[in-house]
Image: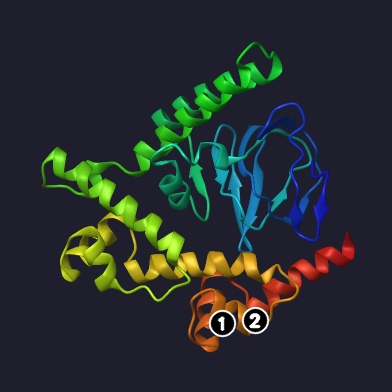
Amino acid sequence: MIEILNGTHETVAYRDFQGIKLYHNVEADNYPLHWHTALEIVVPYENSYTVIIDKIPHTIYEGDIFITPPGTLHALTAPPTGRRLILLFDYSLICNVKGMDSLLHSLLPFTLITKSEHPELNKKLHFYLDEIIREYKDPMPFTEANVYSLMIRFFVAVGRASFNASTRFPGITSAKQHEYIEKFMMVCNYITDHCTENINVDDLADLAGFSKFHFARLFKQFAGMSCYEYLTQKRVAHAEQLLIQPDLSITEVAMLSGFNSLSTFNRIFKTQKNCTPSEYKSLNKQEKRQS
């Protein structure tokens, strides 16, 4: 349920537990386009459920696990009957743990862990979620600490599956594989923190200690996309947050997000988000008028 909605921004009311809200949702109502600073986990228990991101519907089925990162505009569509777990978590509570911040970036724009494609990981994550539900229902001394530790274990499992060194960097020693993982996680963090600045591949290659050619090849193996594509993705994500602010023009948002050309910003944004920056900005105004 959305309790506090201002435009498209939902403020999550955590109530009894700091940074976590959990409930079994049986409502047939659809949730309008919204975003929040919490990370959201949805697991259908009975019937399917649909999450819409960038105008694209993603239907999830019983037992599948859908993760929506913080700050992502999304809508939810429910079937006439059904039951699903919805868990909202303040991910910033664990970002100081080494590796957790890098993992968050890899979850964008969403992460789906199905029973059919990832049976072992799905089973392990369900175990952690069941433990969290048990603690949430029957609080005991140190319940919050245990819940946070379970959330860390949940995302460690996701991260280890996502950053499988032998898959990302085959043909080299195990020690080198893990060294490369650490280096490219550091590079991705740097890109996220400095995406609005004039970053070039030469500087990133120097940061990682590789030649430009070697860096470009290894980065694509690590991230599944080129360094430029990754940087652009981060700039668009930054622009999304600025577009919600009513006092900034589209041109200002483009410049503040690291784009040197308004036409380039419009073209790239529409390619990634299936709408223009102006249309995206108007979404918040429309929702605000309706609320």
Q: Where's residue 70, x and y in %?
A: 60, 50
Along the line of sight, the residue nearer the viewer: 10 or 167? 10
Mark-to-mark CA distance, 2 and 1 = 9 Å
Question: At x 33% / y 50%, what residue is drawn?
Answer: 185
Task: Report which quarter residue 159 is drawn in.
Answer: top left
Q: Residues within 10 Å of mark 2 (few under 14, many from 20)?
A: some
Q: Where's residue 25, x and y in %?
A: 75, 34
Q: Nearer the viewer, mark 2 or mark 1?
A: 2
Along the line of sight, the residue nearer the viewer: 277 or 149? 149
Q: Which residue type does callout 2 highlight?
A: Ile
CB atoms of marks 2 and 1 within 8 Å: yes
Question: At x 88% / y 59%, what residue is drawn?
Answer: 291
Disc tally is 2
Give the vertical position of 124 relative to 39 (above or below). above
Task: Report which quarter residue 9 is drawn in.
Answer: bottom right
Give the vertical position of 21 relative to 225 (above or below). above
Q: Residues within 10 Å of mark 1 (few under 14, many from 20)?
A: some
- Secondary element under disc 2, as helix, strand or loop, is helix
Give the vertical position of 3 relative to 157 (above or below). below
Q: Is residue 104 left or right of residue 132?
A: left
Give the vertical position of 260 relative to 246 (above or below). below
Mark 1, residue position: 266
Question: At x 55% / y 27%, what residue is drawn?
Answer: 148
- Secondary element under disc 1, as helix, strand or loop, is helix
Mark 2, residue position: 250
Q: Where's residue 163, x and y in %?
A: 32, 44
Q: Earlier in the sequence, mark 2 or mark 1?
A: 2
Task: Report which quarter residue 190 is drawn in.
Answer: bottom left
Along the line of sight, the residue nearer the viewer: 11 or 111? 11
Question: At x 28% / y 66%, what residue is drawn?
Answer: 204
Q: Which residue type does callout 1 highlight?
A: Asn
Q: Quadrant of the N terminus?
A: top right
